[in-house]
């Protein structure tokens, strides 16, 4: 859904369509953007595939700050990499070779491969991520699927009724819509769980 459609939906829900509107278009768009980010953070995020490069002799891989979770990794044209946390990986070594492991959690926006490659190599990542763009204008589209638009609206209404203004502040409504949003996110997480194998592993198509 684009920003203009969301503004219309918001104003219909709040009956804020007369002159002297309580919430400006700019504020509604900000709530829309905050809603898609909050939704992604509470539901693991938008599934996507990204390509990253690791330089010869380096064990460092720079990751997009939009990535919330790396689900799987594979050397392009080769094998899958084992995903390990920094605690599981242990101390680094100076050995060079074909990477076998991708280590996550060492620092924000950075991963490590072991061993470091002899030549430049590319890695395909299956990830969950935040939206790539920010919603600031009526023509901007949310990357969150439209089937979840009522959930995003619930978050926007929570923010709208939490606004510290005597004409808009309504703690009862704010709490209600926040609860509806949180319940929706838990439902989405359950739906994602059912899409995975019984043992909890995720099916990937390479």
Image: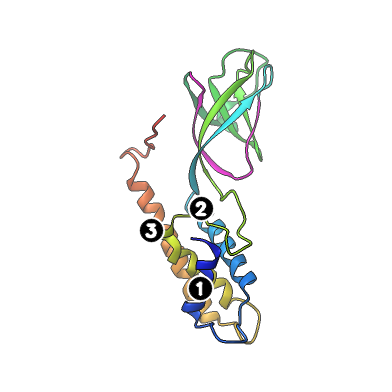
Q: Which residue is rendered at x = 64% and y = 18% of the image? A: 120
Q: Indicate the position of residue 14 as horizontal and vertical percent values.
A: 50, 80
Residue 8 circle label: 1
Q: Which residue is rendered at x = 69% and y = 17% of the image? A: 57
- 18 relative position to 80: left or right: right
Q: Does the magenta portion include 191?
A: no
Q: Which residues are magenta?
A: 60-77
Front of the two marks 2 and 1 = 1
Image quarter hosting the C terminus = top left
Residue 143 circle label: 2
Q: Main secondary structure of the magenta part?
A: strand
Q: CA distance from mark 1 to mark 3?
A: 26 Å
Label 1 secondary element: helix
- Earlier residue among tags 1 and 3: 1
Q: Which residue is rendered at x = 65% and y = 83% of the image? A: 165
Front of the two marks 3 and 2 = 2
Residue on which disc 3 sits: 187
Above or below, 143 against 7 in this view is above
Q: Residues within 10 Å of mark 2 (few under 14, many from 20)?
A: some
Q: Indicate the position of residue 88 as horizontal and vertical percent values.
A: 55, 29
Residue 199 circle label: none
Q: Indicate the position of residue 76 as horizontal and vertical percent values.
A: 51, 22
Label 3 secondary element: helix
Q: Indicate the position of residue 202 as horizontal and vertical percent values.
A: 39, 37
Residue found at the very far left of the displayed protein: 198
Q: Residues within 10 Å of mark 3 (few under 14, many from 20)?
A: few
- 15 relative position to 147: left or right: right
């Amino acid at each position: 859904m684009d920003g203009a459609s969301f503004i219309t939906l918001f104003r219909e829900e709040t009956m804020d369509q007369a002159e002297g509107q309580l919430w400006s278009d700019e504020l509604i768009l900000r709530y829309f953007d905050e809603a898609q980010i909050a939704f992604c953070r509470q539901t693991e995020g938008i599934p996507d595939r990204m390509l990253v490069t690791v330089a010869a002799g380096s064990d460092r891989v720079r990751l997009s700050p939009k990535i919330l979770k790396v689900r799987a990794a594979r050397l392009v044209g080769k094998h899958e990499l084992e995903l390990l946390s920094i605690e599981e990986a242990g101390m680094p070594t100076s050995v060079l070779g074909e990477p076998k492991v991708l280590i996550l959690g060492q620092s924000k926006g950075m991963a490590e491969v072991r061993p470091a490659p002899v030549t430049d190599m590319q890695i395909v990542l299956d990830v969950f991520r935040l939206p790539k763009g920010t919603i600031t204008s009526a023509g901007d589209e949310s990357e969150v699927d439209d089937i979840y638009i009522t959930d995003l609206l619930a978050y926007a209404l929570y923010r709208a009724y939490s606004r510290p203004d005597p004409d808009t502040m309504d703690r009862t409504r704010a709490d209600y819509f926040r609860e509806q949003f949180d319940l929706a996110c838990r439902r989405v997480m359950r739906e994602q769980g059912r899409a995975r194998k019984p043992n909890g592993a995720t099916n990937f198509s390479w």
